[in-house]
Image: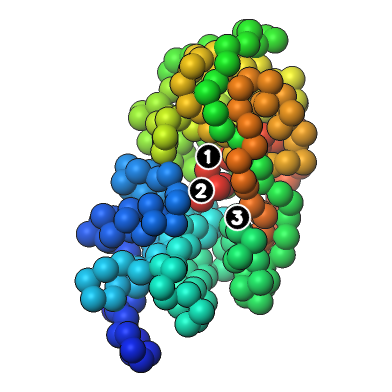
Amino acid sequence: MTEIVTSAPTALEIAPFTEAHLPGALALSQAAGWPHRIEDWALGLSVSQGVAAVSNGRVVSTGLCSFHGPVATLNMIIVDETMRGQGLGRQVMERIIALAGDREMRLVATDEGLPLYRKLGFSEAGRIVQLQGLARATPPERPVCVGPADIDMLAAMDLAASGMQRQPLLTRIAEMGETLTTEGGFALLRPFGRGHVLGPVVAQDAATARALIAAAASHLAGHFLRIDMPEDQGLAAFVETLGLSRSGGGTAMVRAPRPRPQSNLQTHALISQALG
């Protein structure tokens, strides 16, 4: 449903996000300094619904709600600099929260967004650290295979680690990139932004995660690589030895969390800050 919101001096159209909004959304994210390509936007939209606010034919705000079974990740929440301070961000958030329904909701907040998300019922759940740079070859401490793998098995491992049902998304990522597997873990590597991103990295322990990350860095030696990882996993210092350095991050937040079974599998790197 499209809604016209009139607030002097600007009239806004807030509409369901469609593929037609992708070029305008890309321009908005580029203006905000985000590295996403239109292909990165399209990947997120493939598992999402959302809204776009349009003023005079220009996309001035976006928000997506990505569906992963019992969990929704809220993401790509951007407000044009000229439209901030008018309550538009809250309107967009309220609409994508409604899309999430009774699912557990997760997002990664910038410092600027924290006050609004707290008011909307989200609580801090840890820090996400972003690391990026030119990857450096380092032999992994155990054998890692780069090649096709059983997506059903990987999706089951990912569900155990994250609580999210993401088989269609993992299938798309595997088709556009490469799959790394070792005993007790896997990782996906795909084109993103300025180069490639590694994620998710799902592993039974830190040693397994280090092997997958080192194998990815060696595979992309000399090329740009990005990894977004939960800081409490304690692997950031290791990733820095592979040529990557800290470059921002955010605060993981959750609303209406659901209990999930304990598992020895853990998420050591996100698919992205947008998709969890």
Residue corresponding to mark 2: 275
The answer to whether 140 appears left or right of 77 in the picture is right
Left or right for 105, reference 86: right
Nearest the camera: 139 or 240? 240
**Label 2: element kind:** loop
Near mark 2 (Cα within 10 A), the count class, few <14, some 14-19 or many ≥20, is many
Question: Is residue 130 shown above or below 256?
Answer: above
Mark 1 belongs to which amino acid? Ile
Cα separation between marks 3 and 2: 9 Å
User: For numbered disc 3, what is the local secondary structure?
Assistant: strand
Quadrant where the image shows the N terminus = bottom left
The image shows residue 226, relative to residue 220, as above or below, that is: below
Sequence-first disc among 1 and 3:
3
Q: From where the camera sits, is residue 197 visible? A: yes
Which residue is at a point 42% across and 30% down the rendered structure image?
Answer: 195
Residue 108 - label:
3
Please indicate, yes or no, whether residue 1 appears anywhere in the rendered image: no
Q: Mark 3, mark 2: which one is toward the viewer?
A: 3
Neighbour class for label 3 at 10 Å: few (<14), some, many (≥20)? many
Residue labelled with disc 1: 271
In this view of the protein, which residue sits in the foreground, 142 or 193? Answer: 193
Percent of width and height locating residue 28: 36, 59
